[in-house]
Image (spheres, rainbow, N blue to C red):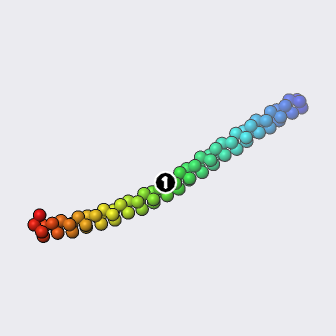
Amino acid sequence: MDEFMREYRKLKRLQNSIKNNSMMKNNQETQLAQNAIVSSYSLNRMNKTQRQEELKDVLKETMSLTTKLKDQLKILEKNGV
């Protein structure tokens, strides 16, 4: 009976060791995935901010060109063209 209990404990320790190793591996993979998500989110946020700035610049340029075209149209109408 003693030998049986020794083998049982030995197998139980081995099983626990395998469980712990797989849990640690899963935790590491989960952590890596979470880091990737955070990095992706930060990158998307930076890209969004950059795109918004570019859109603001394009909108300002469009407004400027629209004003120029309106002024030119007024001059042409004034000259009778």
Nearer to me, 16 or 65: 65
Number of labels in the image equals: 1
Specify whether 22 is left or right of 44.
right
Q: Which residue is under mark 1?
A: 44
Q: Residue furthest right?
A: 2
The quarter in which the N terminus is drawn is: top right
Residue 59: % across, % down:
33, 62
Which residue does the image show at 45% across and 57% down from the upper left?
48
Specify whether 19 is left or right of 71.
right
Which residue does the image show at 66% across and 46% down from the upper left?
28
Specify whether 31 is left or right of 41.
right
Nearer to me, 6 or 1: 6
Which residue does the image show at 49% across and 54% down from the upper left?
44
| Residue 25 position by quadrant | top right
Residue 39 visible? The answer is yes
Residue 5 visible? The answer is no
Nearer to me, 42 or 24: 42
Residue 11: % across, % down:
80, 33
Nearer to me, 52 or 34: 52
Amino acid residing under circle 1: Asn
Label 1 crowd bin: few (<14), some (14–19), many (20+), radius 10 Å: few
Residue 6: % across, % down:
87, 33
Residue 77: % across, % down:
13, 67
Q: Secondary structure at mark 1?
A: helix
**For residue 62, above or below residue 41:** below
Specify whether 77 is left or right of 33.
left
Which residue does the image show at 25% across and 67% down from the upper left?
67
The quarter in which the C terminus is drawn is: bottom left
**For residue 56, above or below residue 38:** below
**For residue 31, above or below residue 60:** above
